């Protein structure tokens, strides 16, 4: 088969990968055999070719969990992920009788394991195949919306054919920005249950003060269990379901990491942007990140103010508040890091050199791409606010979901928008059901007031007049509009939402409700905005491969590693346990111990270590989990592994493929790594599995779980 310029460039880049930073790269598993020499030199003792198959151990044990990653750690579906990845499950199960957030939770046997929120999912990857030719076959020769539709129709067709066999959830992943496409098959497990969660003051010790910081002393882990029907197939929650038997599970090492040891991570990183244009880098620094910091902080302030004196609201919005705080701090750190690394200048210079080296071959397409990106930037402020109006609300989001589902369900299934097909209806129903434990009308109105006030202040050309008609143009008009809507709506009742869901999924008329009437107007505006967006997306899908070909050829000539930007597909990173030297005369050890918990403890949130933990530390009985050199209990450790959002909960393995850590954070200096990799600063923060074992053995005992994982009780 004749090689395309891109394929040749990628192959050359792979052959020269050793010349790049060994710890840089979020690699597709299929690329790892080409890195065998580098992996062996880094210290890996397994067979690199075994890492190419996502359906074989050890990768078949690694799964998508909620918005992050997890890994099976027993043959009976026991699943390890982060406390913060499972925080929504913990919050969902919190009640006045049992404060699972602050007190934690230990199931007293499998009958006591608690069901997760209905929209929580675990996805087990069982297939990964290249389908580029099939996706692009009808798109070639088209442009704009026609190109977008051709790709989207092909994607839907591939997904439908894939799911026709039953029992799987399929998707098509875009690699290298429209250059390659892969079909991914996953089991969608819907019956997930809470098994073990440490108290907040362990799982989130330090909260936002320590978030993205080192040294850390956080037990950011939770154990869940996946269940299936008696036939072994995915099924909704039922007391008659049985534990899922995964194709593989990870073995936890009894030894811990030390500086210089090989480390490898497998997970589902969300999105990186390292292959974006210089103009996109500049826009991120000048506009996008400052806007995110400002708006997220305002929403945080709103929820915290509304929660004062209202314990029920604080519980209902605990998970949402935690997410906003994390996103706000991440945006601030990303901005600071990009400025520290001078990423804008370096990316601009690199792009200019690339264009000079590739000459006029790709110039027309790259110029057209730049024009499309400029139009997208102009719409950015309004699009951001509109997205938050639905994602940060419960009732309005439900109303818009119902209205959009009604519209889409009137079409043939193949013609419906992704997210509203028959395959998506169970998830939509789950979203509608979970509202009851996450909604307070006063909080929602306050959030919408903040966002809509900002929207009112946009220039006329950047606003949709339909929002003005609904919510007015002054603070007083906005207040009256929201008070009227929320006083009259009946969607706060679950039965009201679900009855309309039954009508919407059939494409029928919905029983009248003021919030649904408002949603009809907002969805109409949403559809118009989508039409414009799809025109731009189609052009960018068509044009970006030219930019990629130029970039990959340039990278190959430099001998630099070639890997696709992350896009929530399974990736591998490898490197070593490494200390951090972030500033002149400042050096950090790569391992922390329980001594740091005591040093930080103030008995006040967020440094209010639980008394059982402090007593156990004082007793000094660390058993088999004590570090043989430090002679005490370790807590967290650092590696130079390449990670980003979505890697939360990713298992960290040693040279033999054994589980030694659980990824949960990055250091402050490397938050910008989603855009720019700087080896001086990039570190990932992990829970040492010896700390987990000690907590389960000595502090909040769960001996049956240790037995299940094949671990000693001492």
Image (tube, grey):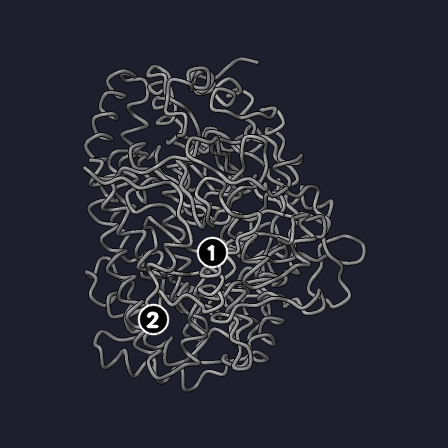
> Which x, y percent locates residue 559?
36, 16
Of 209 and 322, nearer the camera is 209
Q: Mark 2 Cα within 10 Å, few/some/many (few <14, many 20+)? A: few
Quarter of the rendering containing residue 170? top right
Return the residue found at the far right: 231
Residue at 38%, 62% (x, y): give it.
Answer: 525
Spatial distance from mark 2 to mark 1, Cα to Cα? Answer: 18 Å
Q: Tag 2's secondary structure?
A: loop
> Which x, y percent locates residue 137?
55, 30
Taking the image as drawn, is residue 541 in sight?
no
Taking the image as drawn, is residue 2 in sight?
yes
Quarter of the rendering containing residue 210? bottom left
> Which x, y percent locates residue 669?
28, 43
Question: Horizontal placement of 248 versus 137: left or right?
Answer: right
Of 444 and 319, nearer the camera is 319
Residue at 44%, 38% (x, y): give it.
Answer: 566
Q: Which mark is residue 262?
A: none
Disc nearer the start of the sequence (2/1): 1
- The quarter of the rendered structure image containing the N terminus is top right
Callout count: 2
> Dot 2 corresponds to which residue?
604
Question: Horizontal placement of 48 versus 709: left or right?
Answer: left
Q: Which mark is residue 219?
A: 1
> Which x, y percent locates residue 109?
70, 66
Q: Is residue 710 above or below residue 526?
A: above
Q: Is residue 79 above or below residue 29?
A: below
Q: Tag 1's secondary structure?
A: loop
Residue at 47%, 65% (x, y): give it.
Answer: 615
Q: Mark 1 Cα within 10 Å, few/some/many (few <14, many 20+)? A: many
Residue at 28%, 66% (x, y): give it.
Answer: 465
């Amino acid at each position: 088969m004749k090689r395309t310029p891109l394929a040749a460039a990628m192959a050359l880049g792979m052959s020269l990968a050793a010349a790049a930073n060994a710890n840089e790269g979020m690699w597709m598993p299929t690329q790892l055999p080409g890195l065998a020499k580098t992996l062996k030199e880094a210290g890996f003792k397994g067979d690199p070719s075994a890492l190419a198959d996502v359906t074989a151990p050890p990768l078949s044990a690694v799964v998508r969990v909620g918005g992050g990653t997890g890994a099976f750690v027993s043959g009976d579906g026991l699943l390890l992920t982060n406390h913060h990845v499972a925080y929504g499950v913990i919050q969902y199960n919190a009640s006045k009788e049992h404060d699972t957030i602050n007190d934690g939770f230990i199931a007293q046997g499998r009958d006591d394991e608690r069901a997760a929120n209905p929209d929580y999912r675990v996805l087990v990857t069982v297939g990964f195949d290249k389908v580029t030719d099939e996706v692009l076959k009808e798109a070639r020769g088209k442009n704009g919306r026609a190109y977008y539709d051709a790709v989207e129709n092909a994607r839907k067709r591939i997904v439908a054919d894939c799911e026709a066999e039953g029992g799987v959830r399929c998707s098509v992943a875009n690699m290298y920005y429209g250059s390659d496409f892969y079909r991914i098959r996953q089991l969608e497990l819907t019956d997930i249950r809470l098994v073990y969660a440490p108290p907040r003051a362990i799982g989130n010790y330090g909260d936002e003060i320590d978030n993205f910081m080192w040294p850390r002393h956080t037990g950011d882990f939770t154990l869940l269990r996946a269940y299936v029907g008696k036939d072994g197939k995915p099924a909704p929650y039922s007391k008659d379901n049985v534990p899922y038997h995964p194709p593989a599970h990870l073995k936890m090492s009894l030894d811990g990491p030390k500086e210089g040891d090989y480390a490898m991570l497998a997970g589902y990183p969300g999105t990186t942007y390292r292959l974006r244009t210089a103009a996109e880098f500049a826009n991120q620094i000048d506009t996008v990140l400052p806007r995110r910091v400002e708006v997220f902080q305002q929403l945080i302030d709103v929820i915290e103010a509304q929660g004062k004196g209202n314990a029920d609201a604080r519980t209902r919005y605990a998970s949402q508040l935690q997410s906003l705080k994390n996103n706000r701090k991440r945006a601030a750190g990303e901005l600071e890091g990009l400025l520290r690394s001078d990423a804008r200048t370096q990316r601009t210079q690199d792009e200019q050199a690339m264009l000079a080296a590739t000459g006029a071959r790709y110039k027309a397409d790259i110029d057209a791409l730049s024009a499309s990106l400029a139009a997208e930037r102009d719409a950015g402020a309004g699009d951001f606010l509109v997205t938050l109006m639905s994602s940060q609300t419960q009732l309005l989001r439900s109303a818009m979901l119902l209205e959009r589902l009604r519209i889409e369900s009137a079409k043939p299934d193949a013609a419906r928008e992704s997210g509203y097909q028959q395959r998506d209806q169970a998830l939509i129903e789950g979203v509608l059901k979970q509202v009851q434990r996450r909604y307070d009308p006063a909080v929602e109105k306050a959030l919408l007031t903040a966002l809509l006030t900002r929207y009112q202040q946009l220039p006329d050309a950047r606003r949709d007049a339909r929002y003005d008609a609904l919510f007015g143009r002054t603070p007083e008009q906005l207040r009256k509009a929201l008070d009227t809507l929320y006083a009259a709506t009946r969607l706060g009742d679950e039965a009201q939402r679900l009855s309309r869901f039954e009508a919407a999924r059939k494409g029928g008329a919905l029983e009248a409700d003021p919030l649904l009437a408002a949603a009809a107007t907002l969805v109409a505006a949403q559809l118009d905005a989508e039409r414009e967006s799809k025109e731009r997306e189609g052009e960018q899908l068509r044009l970006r491969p030219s930019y990629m070909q130029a970039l990959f050829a340039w990278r190959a000539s430099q001998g630099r590693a070639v890997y696709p930007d992350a896009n929530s597909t399974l990736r591998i990173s490898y490197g070593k346990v490494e200390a951090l030297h972030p500033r002149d005369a400042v050096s950090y050890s790569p391992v922390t111990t329980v001594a740091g918990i005591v040093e930080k403890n103030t008995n006040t949130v967020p440094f209010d270590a639980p008394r059982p933990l402090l007593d156990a530390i004082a007793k000094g009985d660390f058993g088999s989990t004590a570090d043989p050199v430090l002679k005490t209990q370790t807590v967290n450790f650092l590696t130079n592994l390449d990670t980003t959002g979505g890697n939360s909960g990713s298992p960290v393995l040693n040279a033999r493929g054994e589980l030694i850590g659980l990824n949960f954070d990055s250091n402050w200096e490397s938050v910008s790594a989603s855009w720019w990799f700087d080896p001086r600063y990039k570190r990932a923060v992990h829970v040492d599995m010896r700390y987990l074992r000690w907590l389960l053995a000595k502090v909040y005992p769960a001996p049956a779980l240790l037995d299940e994982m094949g671990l000693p009780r001492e």
